[in-house]
Amino acid sequence: MVLNRPGNGSTCCIVTDSKRLNDRQLVSRCLGGDPAAERALYDTHVERIYRLMHRMAGDADLAADFTQDTFIRAFDRLDQYRGESSLATWLHTIGVSVALNGMRKVKRLRGRIESVDGVEGSPNLVVGPTGFTGDLRARLHAAIDALSEKLRPVFVMHDIEGYTHEEIAGTLSIPVGTSKARLFDARARLRLALAAFAGDHIA
Amino acid sequence: MNDDQLDEFLADAARDYNAPSDVPRDAMWARIAEARKQRTVAAPKRAARIWLWTSAGIAAALLIGTGIGIGRRMERTSPAGSSVVASRDANGRRDTTAPAAARRDVAVAPRESSVSAVREATREAAGPDRTLAYQLVVLQHLAGTEAMITSFRASARNGETDAHVSKWARELLGMTRLLEASSAADDPVMKRLLEDMELVIAQIVQYTNRGTNDPEELDLIEQSIKKRGVITKLRSTVPAEAGLAGIRG
């Protein structure tokens, strides 16, 4: 399964030296209190951050909360940006951290609500189109949901949003090889999850 | 369906996974701007708080200085060898009438050994006059820290974040840092205890400031307390009578 395609084409995947220079200039203008620069920074990165947050959270309100939190934190810590990585990578690192922490809290809260309501944990099957492909699609989404905290961000970023392994490695602070290994592992698990449903020839 | 068709299907199906809606760009920016505006308003308050703590630190330093002054004056006015010290008789009862020379003969209880070491260290570093002031400050501080940590654990276990504990912890954190920079930290045992205390109190300050009652954070604080044996060390250092014996000694 190879789904490597660019996400929404909102920003370039390759970070050049000139882009990094622009990042530094933008950051320095923001630190100087230039509101136009702040808005420019936001406009440049918000779409990609929001898309990723939405893919991770599966909920528009949560995605908006995570995105806002990401930018609020980023503006607070902008003086800590050293320009060693691209601004996009730096923002994504904050974003992924915000999303993972946020999702942990959401899961805990949902767990508590379920235990109070006496609802037993059920497979998170998405209601979608009916029939064989509809069921398979729902199973795939549930299987992606069930991926671990280490595997899901890599799969979502690479196979769904089209990030490169270099970008993922920078964002998650892991080696490129680890990013590739996690993607391989994630795909294998998804195949396995669908095997029983779609037939033995998939596995 | 062969493998290629399956991969194609999966590629297509994965694209729909948590598919994003339109980006509420302006709405989010408005909220970000509002949140940042509130923080900017809160910043002067934070600066005022820093000023308040700096003042508190200066006040504490003045208190120590006053203590030293009183100690010096008492030393000058008291005839040599007649100073009253606290000691214990054979039955363990406190005897405040024993002369200073008798102190050498009094067996030091194990729990007071660190305090004695601090006394010795401060005496060497700053002369005998400052001993009283440092003992007063250090022992009261250790006793207060133990009480605060115990109080915090009790309230946090019930999922409560007491504002009083939060304020108390902040005060203790400032004082711990002051003591770390003083002669009290000349003794390696006391220095380590003060460092451990600083870490735990700082964690408590952060926890109470956030007010989120996050069980994971609480667990981390508990681990720090247990791993560093802070409570055990405090209890073994502070005399049974909440530091009074050490103060008089």
Image (spheres, coloured by chain):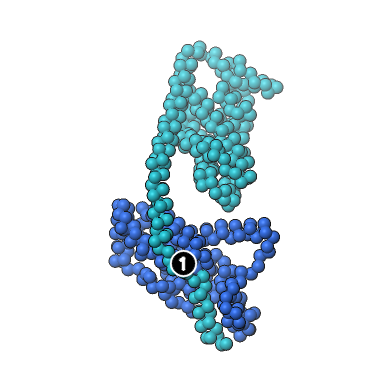
Chain colours: A blue, B cyan
Quadrant in the rendering for residue A21: bottom left
Q: Nearer the viewer, residue A65 or B199?
A: A65
Q: Give the tally of numbered discs.
A: 1
**Residue B150, located in which quarter of the rendered image?**
top right
Question: The N terminus of chain B is located in which quarter?
Answer: bottom right
> Can residue A185 be seen from the camera position used here?
no
Q: Residue furthest bottom?
A: B2
Position of residue A175 in the picture relative to residue B158 (left or right): left
* Chain of the residue displaying label 1: A
**Residue depicted at 43% across the width and 73% down the height:** A7
Report the side of B12 relative to B43 (left or right): right
Task: Kindly state the secondary structure of the residue where label 1 is placed.
Answer: helix
Q: Residue at x 58, y 28 (%)?
A: B243
**x, y percent for residue A112:** 63, 57
Q: Bin the neighbour count of mark 1 within 10 Å (Cα to Cα): few under 14, some 14-19, many 20 and up.
A: many
Mark 1 residue type: Leu
Position above or below: B218 against B113: below
Q: Nearer the viewer, residue B36 or A70?
A: B36
The residue located at (43%, 26%) in the rendering is: B62
Q: Is residue B90 visible?
A: yes
- For the point 48% across and 73% down, which residue is it? A160
Q: Is residue B80 above or below residue B106?
A: above
Q: Can you say which quadrant of the picture contains the C terminus of chain B? A: top right
Q: Which one is in front, A157 or A183?
A: A157
**Location of residue B15 with respect to B161 vertically, above or below:** below
Q: Position of residue B169 (x, y in %)?
A: 52, 38
Q: Give the percent coordinates (x, y) of residue A106.
A: 56, 59
The residue that disc 1 covers is A52
